[in-house]
Image (tube, grey):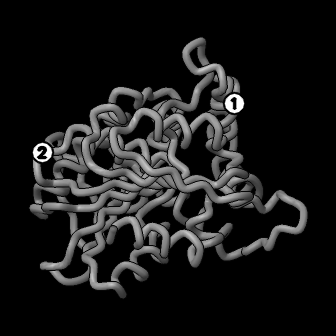
C-alpha cells in the first residue's frame, strides 16, 4: 500500500502487489466504492504473475476528501500522477462502471508507451444520460433521484443499491450474497458524501465519445445484458462502434456487478484478452 500526492495536494491511496518486473494491471473502481472492490480480480491476476495496482479515487475510500476535482478530467489526471509516480509502462487498465469512464478518459490522453490494452466492464461510456443525441439513455430524473436519496439518507441508500439492482439481487431466484451487500455499504460509507454526490454527474453526464475514438490500443468491452445500472444497449455496443480496435463480450443475464457475482466466468475472459 502507498500514497501519491496530486498537484492540488490530494492524497491518493493505492495498493501495489506482485513482482515489480511483472506486467502491470491497473484497476479502476466504480461509484461509490474503492480499490477493495477488486480483491477477487487482484488475487486472480496476482496468481498469474502480474503486478496488480488499484487506487481509491479522490473522495472515495482511503484517499483524500477535497472539496473540488470530482469530475472526469481530474480523475484522469490523478491516474496520470499515479502511473507517473510508479513509472508504469505497457500497463493494462481495467475499469468497472464509473471506473470504465475513468479508463476511457485516461487512456485517450495517456503518454506514449504507458498503456498496452484496456478493458471496460459494465462501463458508463459513451454517455448515460438521455438527450437528443442519446435517445436510448436514462432520463436526468433518474440521476436526480440518486442525488436526492444520497442527500436524504446515504447510509440507507447504500444498502438499497447493492441489495437490489447493482448485483441483480432483486431478480426472482437470485442467489443473494449478504457479504457483497455489506462490503458495498462498508466501502461506500468510507468515502465522502460531497464527492459521491458530485460523482453522480461525472458518471452520468460526461460524454466519452471523443475519448473512445482517440484510443489506439485494443479494448475489451464486457457487459451483462441484465445490467440495471448501466443498461446494456445504450453502453457496450455503442462503445465498441466508436473504438478503433474494440471487442465486445456480452454476458447473457448477468448484472452490473458481475465481477463480484460471477468472477469465475468473467476473470478468465479478461485474462485471455490480456494475454492475446
Check disc 2 and report its element: helix, strand or loop.
loop
Q: Is residue 242 above or below residue 216?
A: above
- Quadrant placement of the C terminus: bottom left
Instruction: Determine the residue located farthest toward the top in the rendered image.
Output: 132
Instruction: Determine the residue located farthest toward the right in the rendered image.
Output: 172
User: Residue at image x 38%, y 38%?
Assistant: 243
Q: Is residue 196 visible?
A: yes
Q: Determine crowd level at label 2: few under 14, some 14-19, many 20+ residues with C-alpha closer than 10 A.
A: few
Task: Tell me: 210 left or right of 164.
Answer: left
Residue receiving disc 2: 111
User: Residue at image x 62%, y 63%?
Assistant: 258
Disc 2 versus disc 1: distance between alpha carbons?
Answer: 36 Å
Q: Quadrant of residue 11?
A: bottom left
Task: Tell me: 159 left or right of 86.
Answer: right
Disc with the residue nearer the chain's start (2 vs 1) = 2
Check disc 1 and report its element: helix, strand or loop.
helix
In the foreground, 216 or 194 = 216
Q: Which mark is residue 72?
A: none
Image location (x, y in percent) of residue 20? 14, 79
User: Residue at image x 68%, y 55%?
Assistant: 166
Residue receiving disc 1: 142
Image location (x, y in percent) of residue 180? 65, 71
Task: Tell me: 119 left or right of 261.
Answer: left
Q: Quadrant of residue 75?
A: top left
Q: Is residue 126 above or below residue 216?
A: above
- Quadrant placement of the N terminus: bottom left
Amino acid at each position: 500500500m502507498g500514497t501519491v500526492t496530486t498537484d492540488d495536494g490530494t492524497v491518493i491511496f493505492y495498493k501495489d502487489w506482485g513482482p515489480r518486473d511483472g506486467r502491470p494491471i491497473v484497476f479502476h473502481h466504480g461509484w461509490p466504492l474503492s480499490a477493495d472492490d477488486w480483491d477477487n480480480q487482484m488475487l486472480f491476476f496476482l496468481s498469474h504473475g502480474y503486478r496488480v495496482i488499484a487506487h481509491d479515487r479522490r473522495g472515495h475510500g482511503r484517499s483524500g476528501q477535497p472539496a473540488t476535482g470530482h469530475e472526469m478530467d481530474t480523475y484522469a489526471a490523478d491516474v496520470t500522477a499515479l502511473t507517473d509516480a510508479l513509472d508504469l509502462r505497457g500497463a493494462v487498465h481495467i475499469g468497472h462502471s464509473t471506473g470504465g469512464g475513468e479508463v476511457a478518459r485516461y487512456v485517450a490522453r495517456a503518454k506514449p508507451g504507458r498503456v498496452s490494452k484496456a478493458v471496460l466492464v459494465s462501463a458508463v461510456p459513451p454517455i448515460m444520460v438521455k438527450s437528443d443525441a442519446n435517445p436510448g439513455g436514462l432520463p436526468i430524473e433518474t440521476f436526480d433521484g440518486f442525488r436526492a436519496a444520497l442527500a436524504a439518507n446515504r447510509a440507507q441508500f447504500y444498502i438499497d443499491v447493492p441489495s437490489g439492482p447493482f448485483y441483480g439481487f432483486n431478480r426472482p431466484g437470485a442467489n443473494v450474497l449478504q457479504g457483497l451487500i455489506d462490503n458495498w455499504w462498508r466501502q461506500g460509507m468510507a468515502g465522502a458524501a460531497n464527492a459521491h454526490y458530485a460523482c453522480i454527474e461525472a458518471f452520468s453526464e460526461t460524454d466519452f465519445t471523443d475519448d473512445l475514438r482517440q484510443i489506439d490500443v485494443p479494448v475489451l468491452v464486457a457487459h451483462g445484458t441484465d445490467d440495471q445500472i448501466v443498461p446494456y444497449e445504450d453502453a457496450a455496443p455503442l462503445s465498441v462502434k466508436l473504438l478503433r480496435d474494440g471487442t465486445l463480450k456480452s454476458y447473457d443475464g448477468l448484472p452490473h456487478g458481475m465481477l463480484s457475482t460471477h468472477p469465475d466466468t468473467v476473470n478468465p475472459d479478461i485474462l485471455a484478452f490480456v494475454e492475446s
